[in-house]
Amino acid sequence: MDMLEIHEAARESDNVPYHEFLQYYKIGEQIVYGFVEGKDDFSFYRRHIESNLSDGWDVKLIKSDNKAKVLKTFDDMEWSRFPKKRVCFFVDRDLSEFLGGEKRSGENLYVTDNYSIENEVVNFKTMECFLEDALGVTDVNSTEFELIRNLFESNLMAFSKAMAPVMAQILLWRRAGANASLDNIEPKRFFIFEEGKIRLKLSFEPPERRIHHAASKVKVPQATSKEINDTEAEFRGKQGLEKYIRGKYLLWFFVQCAKEIHGEIPHICEKYKNKKPPKVHIELSVKNAIFVLGPRVRCPSSLKTFLERNYGAYIREVALAA
């Protein structure tokens, strides 16, 4: 496909991400291409792709707004015209394995290991780096370090257990084909922190009240307690709860937990005793979390393998043909 044909195809396409790709596509340039869901995915994947490319190579990522649009472009691509290993697609797993599995597969289609890329961010290693780099918590001794680790991990487990019934309800809505806007469900309504520890508000301690609140926010009927319990058991039977908690909910948890741990540092670390918490160098919010935390996250091994098998192989093919 020469450049005139590419631009003609761009004019004829009603698929906006595909149209944008055709406009940017350049034959013979040291560029690889990718389609991602949204701006957070763009920030996360660009950093990891760039760090795994050979010198002199660049990546052009196309934001598609959502998973359905990424997959539509995947379906629309005319692979007789473009090298498959040069053009890749990146989507979140979501709850697909409980909904019959991913409907599409391909060597150049990457599906996250967990619910979404945000799930890769929420772990203690990221928290440790953020506390040091952005929140000024340095030179803690081994005992203090373990106290901080235990606080984070116990908070994460408490959050995940409390959100599991809500995620079970979300899965049931998905199975029923209900149109539920998950952004309307805000974890901050359910929790408070006390001395750095997360706990449910008394009014939301029974799971039924969390589910009722979520149902009222998305305006979809709630399931029965038995349906919720049976569905939650499906989560517990597959590799732990955190894998299936929606990434954006986990990201809210991480942001709040980081702020609470920072505020409690004078009560944890001898160095800061009777002092104010150390100066904050970077303000963190849910809106900027992926941009701020992404560089502090190790590239998932599955993603690294995927990039090597596709972009890496394509770059080697170009080098051999030169």
Image (tube, rainbow, N blue to C red):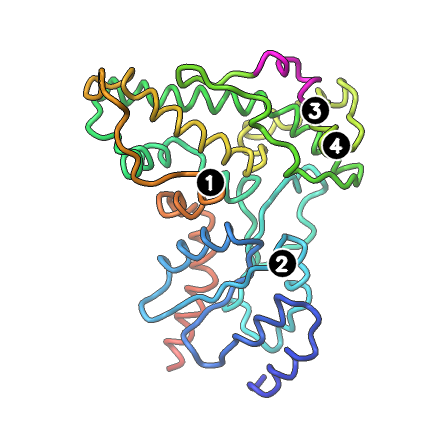
Identify the amino acid type marked 4: Leu
Q: Earlier in the sequence, mark 2 or mark 4?
A: 2
- Would you name the residue on which mark 3 appears? 213
Q: Earlier in the sequence, mark 3 or mark 2?
A: 2
SS for tag 2? Answer: helix
Residue ID at (43%, 45%): 300
- Would you name the residue on which mark 4 appears? 172
Q: Earlier in the sequence, mark 1 or mark 2?
A: 2
Say which of marks 4 and 3 sits in front. Answer: 3
Residue 41 is covered by the magenta coloring: no
Mark 1 and mark 2 residues within 8 Å of each other at the beta carbon:
no
Count of numbered badges drawn on the protein: 4
- Would you name the residue on which mark 2 appears? 70
Identify the amino acid type marked 3: His
Identify the amino acid type marked 1: Glu
Magenta residues, dominant SS class? helix
Looking at the rendering, the stretch of residues picked out in magenta corresponds to 201-211
Task: Name the quadrant of the C terminus.
Answer: bottom left
Q: Earlier in the sequence, mark 4 or mark 3?
A: 4
- Would you name the residue on which mark 1 appears? 120
Give the Cα separation between the discs numbered 1 and 3. 28 Å
In the picture, measured across the screen, residue 174 lies left or right of residue 263, that is right
